[in-house]
Image (cartoon, grey):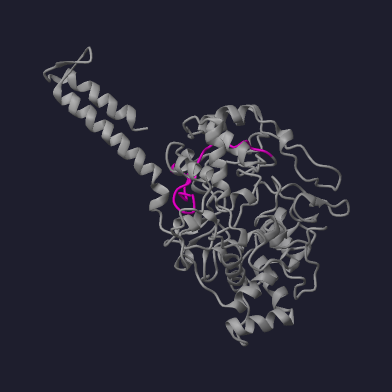
């Protein structure tokens, strides 16, 4: 990117009054010759710096992660897998973020409340069909407990903010009532309030009814109703007694703290071949992975956004991932199935269609990819990055089938109207250099080197049962 800039400076010098001498059939001033030499050295140095970027990254260490007691982690494990936190007692957090499915659910857009089963086998049921697919792809959770991560969700609606109540910014109407131990604890309080994800619909249960009236906080709010459910189970109350004291009433943030502790422990992934390389094992990567790493942090410019040792700049970018499914309803003036991404949080027009750069740890396990789950494979999403405009226009929705809402067959995704696609097209800022097929293959090989095999099925995995005695989802459903 800097080569044209330096070269232009060098070519301008002869026109600034410097004396010229003949050199290779062109008149180039001595100063220009010196400048060109300096530019050449500078470019070579820059390229060398880029190719060595990965080698200068510091290894991930225990100090990068919080520590929690084993008792709190195990309590959080039960709560994370317990349908007691859903309005109709039929879905848990793990239904869409399961260790067996790369901390997500292996489908483009989830079937949330009203569904049955896990992963690609999950579907709406004829007796209680899901209303619609969850609007966005279930994001992976790997390493989100690390202190470096201060922004969560595709649109960043939960983030560290010193000006917000208890230091964490939450969506309007869902502000924290008390301090929590980490960001994951705060985000765990939101899916339980989503009608499509876990709460269910008005008229089905007391949680959904409270939310329909706008009641989240206070003794009649959704959070208090869910807290009372958990507190009413003796096995849970006994576990919380050891955490908060036997005489202290349970609060929703106590539940969030337990789940946050479990997530930080369960989905820590820092023992990949790439990590071994960062810790000094120069033989940890295959030749193809080494070439891919050099491309990733150099010529291919992947690390412009996927920066650092967790491969994310924690920022938001418009890269034109095709919008599929119901969207977030951000354009009420049309049937656009619109999702304005970060702009829905900030209100800034320049943030339209921008979404958070995800970490790439265990990325080979976390497809489909993109905020809408439009691309099923690493090869497809890499191809989109290399030519996002053409990829958006040529996207075939039949390649991203969705689980059935009513229990019968898969659903072809709905796409926005043409005008909305044009707006997504115009917002794209991604512009990467072309790569050969061999270079692309090497980058894919490097992405596989980010897989921590010890975290493939979670560090603890799912429990066989939970204190509520409700049914725990299994992969065989």
**In which quadrant will I find the C terminus?**
bottom right
Up/down of 230 relative to 350, above or below: below
Vertical relation: 79 (above or below) 12: below
- Segment colored magenta: 304-324
Q: Residue furthest top?
A: 25
Which residue, as the protein is rendered here, is positioned at the far bottom?
A: 247
Front one among 316 and 246: 316
Which residue is most to the right?
Answer: 127
Front-most of residues 263 and 222: 263
Residue at 62% from the left image edge and 27% from the top image edge: 393
Relative to 232, 341 lies left or right: left
Residue 258 locus on image (x, y percent): 61, 72
Residue at point 61%, 31% (across, down): 420
Mark yes or no: residue 331 visible.
no
Q: Main secondary structure of the magenta part?
A: loop
Q: Percent position (x, y) of residue 102?
A: 65, 55
Seen at 71% across and 67% down, the residue is 462
| x and y, in percent, of residue 14 in the image | 18, 19
- Locate the N terminus by quadrant: top left
| Magenta segment includes 317 | yes
User: Any magenta on residue 129?
Assistant: no
Q: For residue 200, what is the image quadrant?
A: bottom right
Q: Quadrant of residue 100?
A: bottom right
Q: Nearer the viewer, residue 217 or 94?
A: 94
Left or right: 86 as drawn, with respect to 290: right
Q: Is residue 267 visible?
A: yes
């Amino acid at each position: 990117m800097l080569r044209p800039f330096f070269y232009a400076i060098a070519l301008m010098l002869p026109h600034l009054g410097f004396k010229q001498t003949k050199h290779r059939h062109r008149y180039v001033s001595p100063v220009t010759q010196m400048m060109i030499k300096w530019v050449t050295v500078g470019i070579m140095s820059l390229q060398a710096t880029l190719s060595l970027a990965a080698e200068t990254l510091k290894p991930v260490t225990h100090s990068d992660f919080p520590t929690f007691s084993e008792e709190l982690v195990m309590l959080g494990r039960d709560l994370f897998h317990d349908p007691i936190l859903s309005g109709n007692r039929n879905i848990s957090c793990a239904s869409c973020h399961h260790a067996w499915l790369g901390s997500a659910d292996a489908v483009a857009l989830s079937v949330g409340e009203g569904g049955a089963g896990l992963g690609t086998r999950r579907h709406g049921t004829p007796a209680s069909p899901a209303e619609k697919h969850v609007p966005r792809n279930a994001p992976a959770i790997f390493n989100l407990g690390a202190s470096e991560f201060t922004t969560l969700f595709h649109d960043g609606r939960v983030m560290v903010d010193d000006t917000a109540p208890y230091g964490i910014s939450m969506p309007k109407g869902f502000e924290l009532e008390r301090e929590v131990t980490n960001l994951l604890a705060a985000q765990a309080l939101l899916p339980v309030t989503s009608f499509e994800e876990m709460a269910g619909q008005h008229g089905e249960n007391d949680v959904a009814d409270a939310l329909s009236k706008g009641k989240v906080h206070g003794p009649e709010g959704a959070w208090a109703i869910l807290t009372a459910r958990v507190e009413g189970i003796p096995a849970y109350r006994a576990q919380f007694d050891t955490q908060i004291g036997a005489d202290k009433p349970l609060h929703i943030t106590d539940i969030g703290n337990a789940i946050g502790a479990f997530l930080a422990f369960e989905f820590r992934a820092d023992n990949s071949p790439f990590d071994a390389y960062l810790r000094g094992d120069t033989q940890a990567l295959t030749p193809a992975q080494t070439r891919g790493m050099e491309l990733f942090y150099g010529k291919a410019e992947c690390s412009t956004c996927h920066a650092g040792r967790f491969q994310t700049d924690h920022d938001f970018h418009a890269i034109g991932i095709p919008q599929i499914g119901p969207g977030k309803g951000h354009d009420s003036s049309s049937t656009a199935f619109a999702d304005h991404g970060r702009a829905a949080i900030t209100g800034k027009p320049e943030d339209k269609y921008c979404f958070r750069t995800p970490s790439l740890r265990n990325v080979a396990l976390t497809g489909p990819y993109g905020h809408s789950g439009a691309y099923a494979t690493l090869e497809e999403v890499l191809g989109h990055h290399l030519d996002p405009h053409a990829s958006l226009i040529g996207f075939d929705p039949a390649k991203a089938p969705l689980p059935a809402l009513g229990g019968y067959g898969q659903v072809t995704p709905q796409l926005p109207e043409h005008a909305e696609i044009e707006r997504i097209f115009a917002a794209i800022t991604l512009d990467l250099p072309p790569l050969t097929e061999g270079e692309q293959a090497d980058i894919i090989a490097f992405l596989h080197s980010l897989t921590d095999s010890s975290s493939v099925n979670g560090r603890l995995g799912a429990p066989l049962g939970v204190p509520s005695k409700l049914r725990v989802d299994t992969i065989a459903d």
